[in-house]
Amino acid sequence: MTNPTYAEFGWNAHFARQSNADDTRPFRVTEVHRDSVSAISPDETILLRHSDSTGTLAVGDWVQAIDGQITTVFDRQSLLKRRAPGTDAREQLIAANVTTLGIVSSCNSDFNLSRIERYLVLAADADCLPLVILTKADRAEDPDDYVKQAERLSPLLSAIAIDATDPLEIKRLHPWCRAGDTLALVGSSGVGKTTIRNALTGEEVATQGNRNDDKGRHTTTSRALVRTTAGGWLIDTPGMRALRLADASDGVATVFADIEDLTLSCRFSDCAHDTEPGCAVQAALASGAIDNARMKRWQKLKAEERRNSETLAQARARNKGFGKMVKGVMAKKRQDRGG
Ligand SMILES: Nc1nc2c(ncn2[C@@H]2O[C@H](COP(=O)(O)OP(=O)(O)O)[C@@H](O)[C@H]2O)c(=O)[nH]1
Ligand SMILES: [Mg+2]
């Protein structure tokens, strides 16, 4: 493949507006390491240093550097994040500037509506489009039934069922990873993310199936931005087991907009939608306008969201350092150059 242009990398007016004519050339981050990031531009592949100990850089970010040191992180068009695993309340960035979140699930017992819905909330909160990719369609009796179940979750959602091991069927994903696009894959282990990645990029990263018997292949353990043969970009997210939402009230409000609209008509503004008189949600349940299981999933996500937002606010206050650090480096560089 020839070197991509800035537009093919996903650079657009949103980022151009943020840079000055005399600024250094921007790079897109392909991998985040402890003290550095791997990054690319139309001219080079480069390692850039950062002193961001609080994890505010993400795969997919656009950055600028002076003397190999990151000085600017461009405002993102979208940002996928979760609450870090463990008791820590920290927010963990998953990927930035993603156009479409590919929610990968198999047409088998892995298929779980509440998990898919949780990813929908993540996508809505991050400002990217959701696409449900249902793998192992070749093993299922009625793959269309899975597609229909998924699409019933939200009017914002498209779903497709594929055999990820069939290169021809993988081509159906090309409309989501054309030049300028970035598709990020999330989903449980074993659903076929690496299989899709290999087929879309022409790489040979080891999948769950051939990891043990074929030692020649490398396994990926970190998130990386890679180029697809369709011209766009793909981010695989290996090792992302639990998805705990971080500060996702906007996402919940988008995915469950119908229910949240109803709550505005409840008689009491602090209605718990349980046994209160004049509860519009209970009325809609009784009339069959909304589904009981879905309403339960909404309540569960709301409760989780409430628990998270307080601890996250505290964690954020602790981690305010990075913005100051960037400004400090910029000021110092200007001094060094006599500017
Ligand atoms: N039959 C079939 N097998 C698949 C499909 N997608 C993935 N697999 C197999 O499922 C196993 C796990 O796939 P992998 O890509 O490693 O999953 P990951 O953990 O999500 O990266 C491998 O043996 C794949 O060959 C599919 O659509 N059909
Ligand atoms: Mg994998």
Image (tube, rainbow, N blue to C red):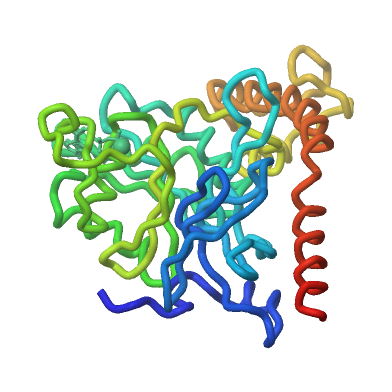
Q: Nearer the viewer, residue 102 or 297?
A: 102
Q: Which of 181 and 133 is in front in this view?
A: 181
Residue lying at 67% horizontally and 23% vertically, measured from the top left: 88
Q: In this view, does 40 lie above or below 224?
A: below
Residue lying at 34% horizontally and 64% vertically, measured from the top left: 175
Residue lying at 79% horizontally and 74% vertically, measured from the top left: 334
Q: In this view, does 296 lie above or below 142?
A: above
Can the viewer see residue 222 in this picture?
Answer: yes
The quadrant of the picture occupied by the N terminus is bottom left
In this view, which residue lies farthest toward the bottom?
Answer: 21
Give the percent coordinates (x, y) of residue 228.
30, 62
In this view, which residue lies farthest toward the left?
Answer: 213
Can the viewer see residue 288 in this picture?
Answer: no
The quadrant of the picture occupied by the C terminus is bottom right
Please indicate whether residue 103 sits to the left or right of residue 268 in the image: left
Residue lying at 34% horizontally and 35% vertically, measured from the top left: 105
Give the percent coordinates (x, y) of residue 265.
81, 35
Give the percent coordinates (x, y) of residue 87.
65, 18
Please indicate whether residue 61 sits to the left or right of residue 135 in the image: right
Answer with the quarter of the image where residue 94 lies. top right
Answer with the quarter of the image where residue 93 lies. top right
Number of marks in the image? 0
Quadrant containing ligand 2 reads: top left
Please indicate whether residue 117 sits to the left or right of residue 314 in the image: left
Give the percent coordinates (x, y) of residue 140.
18, 31
Q: Which of 334 and 263 is in front in this view?
A: 334
Q: Is residue 228 above or below residue 224?
A: below
Q: Nearer the viewer, residue 202 or 54?
A: 54
